[in-house]
Image (cartoon, rainbow, N blue to C red):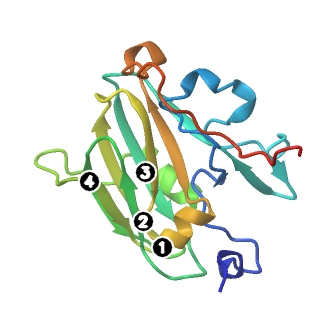
Amino acid sequence: MTALRLLPASGNYPQLFNTTFSYPSFPLLTQRDSLTPDMYCSGEVPSDSGYCSDGFCSCTNILNFPLDSLVELVLVDLDSFTHMDHPMHLHGTQFHVIAMETMENITLDAVKQLNEQGGIPKKLTGPPLKDTVSVPVSGYAVIRFRVTNPGYWFFHCHISSHAELGMAVVFKFGEHQEMAPTPRNFPTCGNWQLPDN
C-alpha cells in the first residue's frame, strides 16, 4: 500500500497549522545561505497564497523563534478520520507539558477561546519535561519551552506515515549568525538532475 492511499477521500490530511509540510531538497542548517524567502512559508498559510490550491496548502513551513524566548503552543487534534492520538516529537530541545484534555465537539475556535479566557488549567509547577507528547484525539495538549539551542529543528508527528504525508513543521531557533557555522567544504545536497548526455 502506498502512502497516498492512506489519504482520506474527504480531503482531511495530516497537517500542522492547516498546512502540509513539503520537504526541502537540502538540509536547512548547513545550507541556510541557499534558503530564499520564496522557498518557504511561515505559520498558517492564507488560502489565496501561491502555496494553496482548492483549499489544500503545502509548503516548507518554518516558524521563527528568537533565542531566549518563551514559547507556548496549544496543539489541537481535530482528527475525525483515524481516531488516534498523535505523538508529536520535537528535535533540538525538550518542552514542559503544562496541560492536556479531551473535549466533546472540539473545534479550534473553542480551544482558542478557552485558552484566551484562561479556561485551560495549566500546571506551571513541576510539569513533566518531554521531547514527545501524545496529543489526544478530540483534545489538546499545551507545551512550553525556552528557546536556547540555535538551529533548524523538526517538529513532527511520530507516526511515520503522518510525518511522511506532511504533519510537520520546522522551528528556526535564533538567527543565522547565532547558529554554529557550517564547516568549510562541507558536502551539499540538492535535487538530483539527470545528466544531459
At label 4, the amino acid type is Val
Tell me the kind of residue under disc 3: Val
In the rendered image of this protein, does residue 179 appear above or below residue 51?
A: above
Using the numbered discs, state the Cα–Cα distance from disc 1 to disc 3 in whole angstroms: 13 Å
Question: Where residue 174 sits in the image (x, y, percent)?
Answer: 41, 22
| Mark found first going from the N terminus, 3 or 2 | 3
**Mark 2 element type:** loop
Q: Position of residue 53 (x, y in %)?
A: 86, 54
Contact between marks 1 and 2 (CB within 8 A): the answer is no
Q: CA distance from mark 4 to mark 2?
A: 17 Å
Separation (CA) of disc 4 from disc 1: 17 Å
Question: Which residue is tagged 4?
Answer: 97
- Residue that numbered label 1 is attached to: 138
Q: Which residue is mark 3?
A: 74
Q: What residue type is disc 2 on? A: His
Mark 3 burial class by Cα count in 10 Å: few <14, some 14-19, many 20+: some
Q: In the rendered image, is residue 117 in sight?
A: no
| Mark toward the start of the polypeptide (4 vs 3) | 3
* Marks 1 and 2, the one that precedes in the sequence: 1
Residue positioned 75% across, 52% down in the render? 57
